[in-house]
Image (tube, grey):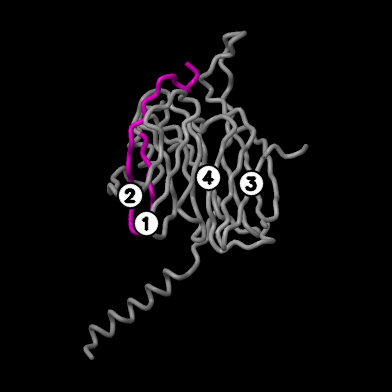
Amino acid sequence: MHAGRRLVLKGGIALAALASLPRVLLAAAWPEKAFSSTAAGQAMIDLLGTDQTTASDQIRLKVPEIAENGAVVPVTISTSLENVESISIVVENNPRPLAATFEISPETLPDISSRIKMGETSDVMAVVKTDAGIFSTSKQVKVTIGGCGG
Amino acid sequence: MASKIKVKAKLSGDIAEIKTLMLHPMETGARKDPDTGALVPMHHITQLTLTKNGEPIVVANLSTAVAKNPYFSCKVRGAKAGDMLKISWVDNLGATDELETVLG
């Protein structure tokens, strides 16, 4: 057996060992900068370090096509992507686009639901961070009555 | 004070589906009081934490864009009857609430 191949094998085993270490979920500080950002791209840079995401059809974003009341818009995000670290909801046209970010432990399934507010019709983006990168999918929600105090 | 968190946890196989509802105004800071016309100060949950037997399973950071009386649901693998679930939150004014429930 070639030494080079041996090395690759060893490297692979080491990597596998590293990956199998349980990732510990730590309550980090509330990401104030990302939440106070007024542009979706900047909010994502502040939160995830980049606004570049890979569009993925493995993320299922369930939102209503038309929300009669922007104050309560149900959102469900699930994905078949593996090793999900966090799921975030970004509403592009909200005054502060980052609505929420959910960090999950390895034993939590990437399948969450919540309810958000939307000021006006907007694309809603589900951003999923895995150990392989940052993936997203978007859907437009038409809002007939805004939910941002107007 | 009694907890104002409601939780429903359902075990099917080794997967627990946890649904929770928190009582909180989630004020954006942009809404005007209809009587006085003054802005209602921002008041919202910042961090929501779910733990199972003391281990965090979800840490959620929320903004004012989460609807009033926030709803959240998730699913956790490796759950069994007798597991202790704890749901707790803290808001931007430092108020907290928590609820513990036993799965099963």
Mark 1 = which residue? A81
> What separation in Å lies between label 3 and label 1 (alpha carbons)?
27 Å
User: Gap between marks 4 and 1, in whole Å?
Assistant: 20 Å
Residue A92 placement: quadrant: top left
Disc number lying in front (4 or 3)? 3
Q: Are marks 4 and 1 in contact (CB under 8 Å)?
A: no
Do marks 3 and 2 both belong to one polypeptide chain? no
For mark 2, does the 10 Å Cα neighbourhood hold few (<14), some (14 to 19), or many (20 or more) residues?
Answer: many
State the image coordinates of residue A56 (x, y, percent, origin top left): 29, 49
> Which kind of residue does numbered mark 3 sit on?
Lys
Q: Do residues under tags 1 and 2 come within 8 Å of each other at their CB atoms?
A: yes
- Please give the chain letter of the residue carrying mark 4: B
Report the residue that reaches farthest toward the bottom.
Answer: A1
Q: Which residue is farthest top?
A: B36
Marks 4 and 3 sit apart, C-alpha to C-alpha, by 18 Å
The amino acid type, in three-letter code, at marker 2 is Phe
Mark 1 crowd level (few <14, some 14–19, many ≥20, 10 Å Cα): some
Whether tag 3 and tag 1 are in contact, CB under 8 A, the answer is no
Q: Secondary structure at mark 4?
A: strand
Residue B8's disc number: 3
Mark number, residue A135: 2
Query: In the rendered image, which quarter contains the C terminus of chain B?
Result: bottom right
Circles 4 and 3 on the same subunit: yes
| Magenta stretch encompasses residue A137 | yes
The magenta stretch is A124-150
Image x and y of residue B25, in percent: 61, 27
Name the residue type under label 4.
Ala
Q: Secondary structure at mark 1?
A: loop
Residue A3, label in figure: none
Q: Quadrant of residue A145?
A: top left
Residue A75: where, in percent of width, then height? 45, 38
Q: Residues within 10 Å of mark 3 (few under 14, many from 20)?
A: few
